[in-house]
Image (cartoon, helix red, strand yellow):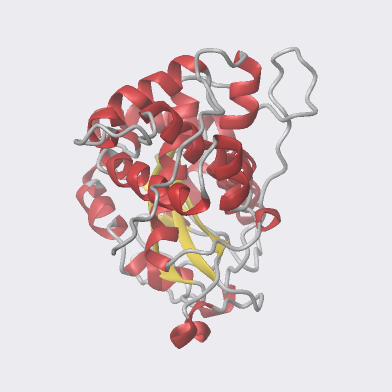
Amino acid sequence: MRRWRNPPVYRPLVDLLTMEERHLIVTYRFDRATIQELCTQLEPDLISPIRHPTGIPPDVQVLSVLHFLASGSFPTTVAMASGMSQPMFSNVLSRVLSPLLKHVRRYIIFPEVEDLPTVKGDFYALGHIPNVIGAIDGIHVALVPPQRSEQVYRNRKSYHSMNVQMVCLADQYISQVNAMFPGSVHDAYILRNSSIPDMMGQLQRHRVWLLGDSGYPKLSWLLTPVRNPRTMAEERYNEAHGQTRRVIERTFGLLKARFRCLHMTGGSLFYSPKKVCDIIIACSMLHNLALRRQVPFLQEDDPDDGVVAAVEPVEPVDSDEDEAEEDENDNRESVIQQYIQ
C-alpha cells in the first residue's frame, strides 16, 4: 500500500498589519504602505491557483524575502522566523523574485532626454563638472561558485564573486546594473559588453558623459582621472572628478548596508550564479524604491528618532587600473581646459 507523505504545514508567525512601523523598517527595510504596495503588485503571481490549507499568504511571502535580503541571514533562520520550512522558503524566494524582476524597467531607469537638464544639474552641484549624467563602477558580491568553473569566479582578492557594474545618479538612484559576469572579469570588459555604449551613443548629440575610475578606458562619453597630473588645471580636474564620482561609493555603501545579503558580513550566497544575479537586481530595484518612497535606513541600535543611520562608503574591490585601454576619441582634455578653472 502506497503511503502519502504529509504536506509541509505553514504556521503563521508574522502579520504585516500588527507589526510596529519602526520594526518593519528595521527588519524588512520598508514601511507598511510600501510593503503593501509591493504585495499588491506581486499578488497575482503569488496566489496559488489551487486553494490549499498550507498555502502561504502573499504578504508573508514578500515579508520573508525582504527579511532575507535585508538581514543576510541563513535561509533556515529566515524560514523559521516566518513560520515555514527551509525548502518552503527556497520555493518562496523564487516565487517572489520572478514576478518582481518582471517590473525591472519600472524601477531601474537610465536617464532619458527629458531628464538630462535635471540630472546634469544635480551632478554639477557635487563637483562643478558639467554634463555628467552618471557615475559608473563595479562591486563584487560573494557567492559559492559552481565546482566545474570555480576559477572563473575567483577575483583578484582571492574570493569568489560576481562582478557587478552599476551606474548611479547624484541622489544615489541606481540607473543601470549588470550582474551577469563572474568575479575574474575585468571592469572594462563588462563595460564593452553591456548596454551602456549603445545608450550613451544615442545621447552623444547632447554632449553628456559618465565618470569612471582609471580602470576604465577613456572614451568620448566616459571621463576618467588624469593618472599623473602635471598642471594645476589637471589637479583641479582630478579633485572635482573624485568629489563627484564619490557618489557611486556612497551608493554601494547604502545598498550593501540596506541589503546585507550582498555584503561580505552576510557570508557568500549559496545559490546558482543566475539566482545570485536575480538577487542583486532585485536589491537594486528595492534600493531605488526605498529612495523614491523616502524610507529612512534604520538599524536595530539606532535611536528611536527617525534619524537615518550613517553609512560608510564601500570602496571598489577591484579596479585593475593598469589594464585599461585608451580611446583616441577623448573629451577629457577639453573638459579640463574649458571648465576646470
Q: x%, y% of residue 128?
A: 54, 35
Residue at 43%, 67% in the rendered image: 272
The answer to whether residue 229 shows anywhere in this view is: yes
Figure check: 312 above or below 334: above
Q: x%, y% of residue 33?
A: 45, 14
71 to the left or right of 12? right
Foreground: 265 or 249? 265
Figure check: 6 above or below 163: above
The answer to whether residue 331 shows anywhere in this view is: no
Foreground: 6 or 308? 6
Foreground: 73 or 181? 73
* Quarter location, residue 106: top left
Residue at 34%, 39% in the rendered image: 108
Residue at 24%, 31% in the rendered image: 51
Q: x%, y% of residue 269?
A: 55, 61
- Quarter of the image with the C terminus is top right
- Quarter of the image with the N terminus is bottom left
80 to the left or right of 205? right
Figure check: 5 above or below 248: below
Q: How many marks?
A: 0
Residue at 62%, 53% in the rendered image: 74
Q: x%, y% of residue 52?
A: 29, 34
Foreground: 286 or 249? 286
213 to the left or right of 119? right
